[in-house]
Image (spheres, helix red, strand yellow):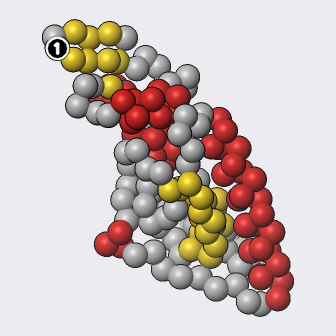
Amino acid sequence: PEDILEMPTFGCFNLHPALLPKFRGPDPLFWIFYHGVRQTGVTVHHMTKRIDAGDMVAQSAWTIENGVSEKTLLAHCAEAGGRLFIEVITALGKGHLVSRPQNKEQSSYFSWPDQRDRVVTPERSAQWAYNFIKGIGKRIEPLEFHGDGYRYR
């Protein structure tokens, strides 16, 4: 409820494992791999009644290496997010926290992936397939492979 978000003096904050305003939603790492994004990061933002739509207070970005697993990427997000929260808490204590609204024109929202999103087809590049399978293949099963009249799970 919104009234809970307003109870703390400075509001509530969330660490989102993507560079907002892109990839709002409950499973951003899946969609980052799905869309073949090479640049990602974490964002600390104010929580509002709309998911991942609050003003941003800190971000950290980096390049995703080919073949990285979701587990490794999530660990990188947690480490970078911990450092960002220290910066946010320090800025709050000094009264210097700066918030900036998200650019609505650049925003995207993705819900939970479904089976149609777990398909690898020949239209995708080999590099995309490698990164997608290495990235989320162990968590999102079954993946499907389609092409030339065949379908494998």
Which residue is denoted by mark 1 in the rendering?
148
Position of residue 44 measured from the top left corner of the image (x, y, whole percent)? 63, 66
Residue 92 vs 51, above or below: the answer is: below
Position of residue 74 measured from the top left corner of the image (x, y, whole percent)? 65, 43
Residue 43: quadrant of the picture: bottom right
Taking depth in this image into account, of 8 and 31 the one nearest to the observer is 31
Q: Is residue 24 left or right of residue 124?
A: right
Residue type at tag 1 = Asp
Secondary structure found at label 1? loop
The residue positioned 55% from the left and 22% from the top of the image is 138
Q: Quadrant of the C terminus?
A: top left
| Whether residue 89 can be seen here | yes
Residue 22: quadrant of the picture: bottom left
Position of residue 100 measured from the top left corner of the image (x, y, whole percent)? 53, 82
Q: Is the residue marked by circle 1 packed among few (<14), some (14-19), or many (20+) residues within 10 Å?
A: few
Residue 145 vs 21, above or below: the answer is: above
Residue 69 vs 115, above or below: the answer is: below
| Whether residue 26 can be seen here | no
Q: Quadrant of the N terminus?
A: bottom right
The residue positioned 66% from the left and 51% from the top of the image is 77
Q: Is residue 27 left or right of residue 76?
A: left
